[in-house]
Amino acid sequence: MTPAQRAEREQAAAAANRAHLESKRTRHGARVNIPVKDGCVIVFSDAHFWPGYISNANRALLQLIPKLKPYAVINNGDSFDGASISRYPRIGWDTKPTVAEELAANTVRLAEIQKAAGDVFYTWNIGNHDARFETFLAQHAAQFEKVPGFTLKDHYPGWAPAWSTFIGDQAVVTHRFKSGKYAAFNNTLWAGRTIVTGHDHMLWEKPVTDLNGVRFGIDAGTLADIWGPQFVDYTEDNVVDWASGFPILHFRGGLFTGTEFVRAMPDGRTIFRGELLNV
C-alpha cells in the first residue's frame, strides 16, 4: 500500500467513525455515544498543546496506543489553550503563541494520535479553553457565523465534537462537572455513574459505594508537563498539585472493569504498570 493509499484509507475510516458518532448524538446534539466493547478506551485531557513542545505523557501515549489497541480515544478538552485570546490580561511581557500556531500544534499532535490508533472512535469533549476559540469570534466577529473555519470542529473533522461522551451505560467522560479538591468524589456522587473528568489537572480515582454497587470518580490529569511553558507565568512558577498522565478504561462483557493510570513524574520518570517507560 502506498503512502497516498494509506492516507486515503485513514481519512475514509475517520469519516466513517465521525458519521457513526454523529448519528448517535443525543440531548440536542451535545452528547455522543460509543459502545461498550471488550477492550479499552484511552482518555487524555488538558493537553494544552504548545508549538514545538511535546511532553513525556504525550510520548507515552503515542508509545502505548499501538500496544494497548484501544477501540476509542477521547480528547477530554483543553487541547487548544487559546492563550492569546484569553479573557485574562497579559502577564508582564510574556509571549504567547498565536491562534494559527496553536491550531497547527493541535493538527500535528492529534494526527500523530490518529496514526498510532488507526480506525477507532475519536471524540473531542470541548473544554473551557477550547471554547475560547468560538467565544472570541462570537464576540468580535459575529457577522462571520457559519463561515467555514470559524468553529474549532471545522479544523479537526476526524474528531466528533461533544460536551460529553457516553460509553454505553457504564461511564461518562466530560471535561468538567463539580469543582474543588474533591471534585472526583462529588462528580460520581452526583452523576450516579462512573465519570471521568479533566479540568483540574489531577490524576486519581475515588470509588463510591452505595446500594447500587460501586462506581468511580476519575480525574484524567493533564497530558501536558506540569512544569511546561504553558503554565510558567500563569502559576508564577509556584508548586502545583497537578499530575501529568492519563487514564485507561477497561471493559469486559459489557461492564466497566477498572482503570489504569500512566504517570509522567516531575522528575522525568514515566511509569506504567510498575515499569519505567523509555519515552
Image (cartoon, rainbow, N blue to C red):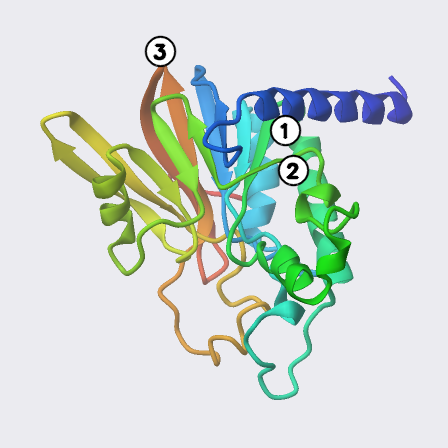
The answer for how far apart the CA atoms under marks 3 and 2 are is 27 Å
Against 200, is 12 above or below? above
Horizontal relation, residue 1 to residue 83: left or right: right
Give coordinates of residue 27: x percent, y percent.
45, 31
Q: Residues within 10 Å of mark 1 (few under 14, many from 20)?
A: many
Q: Amino acid at mark 3?
A: Gly
The residue where tag 3 is placed is 253
The residue where tag 2 is placed is 113
Q: Amino acid at mark 1?
A: Ala
Q: Amino acid at mark 2?
A: Ile
Q: Secondary structure at mark 2?
A: helix
- Residue 117 marker: 1
The answer for how far apart the CA atoms under marks 3 and 1 are is 23 Å
Against 192, is 244 above or below? below
- Could you tell me if the residues under marks 1 and 2 are in contact, i.e. CB atoms within 8 Å? yes
Give coordinates of residue 107: x percent, y percent.
73, 47
